[in-house]
Amino acid sequence: MHAGAPPGTLDQATKDFLSARPQLFGIAYRVLGSAAEAEDIVQETWLRWQSTDRSKVHEPAAFLTTVATRLAINVAQSARVRRESYVGPWLPEPVDTTQDPYLGAERAEAGAVEMAVLLLLEKLNPVERTAYVLREAFDYPYGRIAEILETSEANTRQLVSRGRKHLAAERKEAVTPTAHRRLLEVFLSAARTGDLSGLEDVLTADVVSYTDGNGIRGASRIPVVGLPHVSHYLVAFAPRFWPQSQVRWVEANGRPAVLVLSGEKAVALLTADISADGIDRLMWVMNPAKLAPYVASLRA
């Protein structure tokens, strides 16, 4: 475990857990798309670590990662059933990556944390999603992933390959953060003024607008698809939404984003998936249960 450290002591167990905690959260969040559920996974891992015979554990970080990952898969499997009662589109819970830019990721690009990527990963089954996250975001060896998932290395490679192919088919290459903000600024100006031609200039032909409100008033309960529908929807939406609103530029999931406020109250977080062709996806988080933790992290 650690040279000179009694392996069974709670003090050493706490040190081992705290050292691994950022990565545990990072894995669970990417698998679940929910910071609240990821925190629950981390806490449950801690409880299990406390009750484990730690004298038999030679690699605490590996043990903790295995426990947290398997717990996350179980929660992800049950989440599909629970989300059937969700009203309207479901989007991942946003996180303030300025507080922890990599959310526990070991690779420099901190893969699989952007909102659009997390949304697309939802279409994979939980095991495929987990294999992809461990490989692409954390650079785990295929053999180690196979151990965690209790499968063969050959099957693990297939799982990761499926994830890569799915994302490659569904998503274009993202632009730089600077270009991302620049285009989002142009979009915001056009959206706030109801400028139809301005919107048509920055939206792609197959753009999709998702609004996650879980039934709150004013939130579209179905995705709006295609340039004509999205642009006209935004123009019709503008007089009711923007005149009483202020905006604040923030960062969410590693990309520039816009927090929309009415007075002191946050009413929406706008994030976008942007390629060289323009804005491919608009994602509006309006569910207060998802907005509140994000706003609280900004204040912290």
Image (cartoon, rainbow, N blue to C red):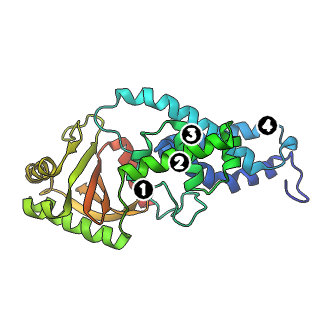
Which residue position is annotated with label 3?
Answer: 40
Report the mark closest to the observer, 1 or 4: 1
Amino acid type of the residue tagged 4 in the rendering: Thr
Residue shown at the point (59%, 50%) measured from the top left: 134
Q: Nearer the viewer, mark 2 or mark 1?
A: 2
Pointer 2 and pointer 1: residues touching (CB < 8 Å)?
Answer: no
In the figure, residue 57 lies in which quadrant? top right
Counting residues from the start of the chain, the first of labels 1 and 4 encountered is 4
Q: Sequence order check: which comes first, mark 3 or mark 2?
A: 3
Residue bearing the label numbered 4: 52
Which of marks 3 and 1 precedes in the sequence? 3
User: Does the residue at mark 3 contact the one at mark 2 (Cβ under 8 Å)?
Assistant: no
Mark in the foreground, 1 or 3: 1
Q: Nearer the viewer's eye, disc 3 or disc 2? A: 2
Q: Residue, x 37% and y 70% (percent of image)?
A: 176
Element class at badge 3: helix
Give the class, few, some or many, for how many residues have Cα within 10 Å of label 3's Cα (few <14, many ≥20): some
